[in-house]
Image: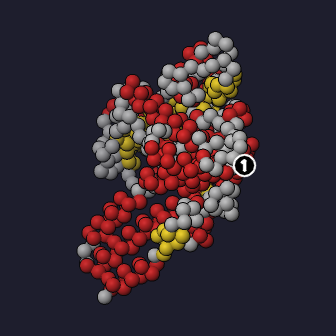
Amino acid sequence: MRLCLLIMALVTLAGCAVNPATGRTDFVMMSEAQELSLGRDAHQQILKQYPRYPDEALQAYVQQVGERVARHSHRGQLDYHFTVIDSPDINAFALPGGYIYIHRGLMAYLGSEAELAAVLGHEVGHVTARHGVRQQSQSTAWGLLGQAVAMGTGVGAAADVTGVLGNAVVRGYGRDMELEADGLGAQYLARGGYDPQAMIEVVKVLKLQEDFARDQAAARGEQQPVGSYHGLFDTHPDNDRRLQQVIGPARALVAGQQEVNREAFLKRLQGLPFGDSAESGIRRGERFYHGDLDFTLAFAKGWSIINEPQQLVGQSPDKRVLVAMMLEDNPRRLDAATLLSQRIGGRRLRAGEPLQQAGLQGYTGLVEGSVPRRVAVILKGDKAYLFIGAAKGRAASATEDAQMLAAISSFRPLQPAERKLAEPLRLQVLRVAPGQTVKALAVGSGLPGDAEATLRLLNNLYPQGESRPGEWFKTVR
């Protein structure tokens, strides 16, 4: 009886609603008011997790382009918010209710305002078709059903089985939803006066990203990295038959001259940081520089640096040893040993010793446990820099612990000559002069690695394309 009542309750909670974009009846468990509330709450969390790019002119421009597309959508009455995230990642995403984000890194590779509108239109398509709401509803329903079966049968594993099934159904948006978002976005582009072909051009841009990443990984003898962009753009080629089919109807909406606005868009990119920004800190090989916070530190040769909003992580080449650094306030000006003792929560600290480097005070030691960890605190003004070093699933060897301690001990204020190293590379837009080649433009660009290949990628010329005299070209200085 209890199982029957729970399943009846699930059916009561579940609802069907007409999709405003497709006209189909969808399974949803959330009203529009709840959707808007969910988006507002999640938006606040996103802003805490991801830094907003501090250029109000560019933010306003992206908002303007996004609104132009969104007001021609099936849910043009929503209050849309478009935000540029200060990150070099190639990504864009949308929250329910009209909150849409594009990473600065993706903007650098786009070639026109129409392509920017295509990315934003794709994300608007997710909002108008309520893909996030449908995903959330399916996930909730599977979870409730799993609980009902488990309680009714007394077999806890039943919940796990249905949970796995539910996750399989809703993981990612899936090819069909992404195609739907592309088709809707192309319609909104055409109605907004942009060329819907820009949707195909963005697919080309992002496919070249995959080609470049694969070729660079192969040159280093590494496995090809997984693409970061969630959308359909990284799941099919630009000549895909189904993509052409969903873009096709948008072409029928074209009336008169459709805008591309390449020059106006490229001028907006002038001076845009390429790669890391000054606000987040600059990675140069195994060394990290932060001008605003006035510090630098270095990791062992061959280590990679992962710069996240909440922490900086140095990782060994085999990814089995790491050192993470976090920043927190120290308003009470506690000494390093006391602060470290508080942060390890009463666990025993072994081999504790003070750190004194470049006029800064610190303390370090090993936290005992099943897997001992190297921990440290370095004080700088009213800030405390916390370090945690560990080897994956085991105690670090003496050599590995020495590498961790060396990274921690390298932390120091910037020297005057290093201030420039804490400044980012920036995009510079120019017209190609007669006889000027990509190879010549790459000389002195300051780009790490294969600068020539990177410039070709930036200008949609990868792998062997060449610029023409008089054309606009993005370089890096």
Q: Position of residue 406 (x, y in %)?
A: 44, 31
- The image shows a total of numbered marks equal to 1
Quarter of the N terminus within the rendering: bottom left
Placement of the C terminus among the 4 image quadrants = top right
Q: Amino acid at mark 1?
A: Gln
Residue 95 picture quarter: bottom right
Identity of the residue drawn at 58% across and 28% down? 459
Name the residue: 67% across, 23% down: 471
Closer to the camera, 299 or 85?
A: 85
Give the answer, above or below, for where 139 lies relative to 249. Answer: below
44 up-or-down from 325: above or below: below
Quarter assignment of residue 12 = bottom left
The residue drawn where x is 41% and y is 78% is 10
Residue at image location 47% in from the left, 55% down from the top: 177
Q: Is residue 137 visible?
A: yes
Say whether residue 387 is left or right of residue 190.
left
Percent across and percent down for residue 243 are 48, 46
> Is residue 49 among what the camera can see?
no
- On screen, 394 above or below 148? above
Q: Secondary structure at mark 1?
A: helix
Q: Is residue 11 above or below residue 41?
A: below
Which colouring convention does the figure follow?
secondary structure
User: Is 166 placed left or right of 239 in the picture?
Assistant: left
Percent x, y of residue 221: 35, 27
List x then y, in percent, for residue 102.
Answer: 60, 46
The residue under label 1 is: 64
Furthest residue toward bottom: 1
* Residue in the foreground of this view, choosing between 380 and 61: 61
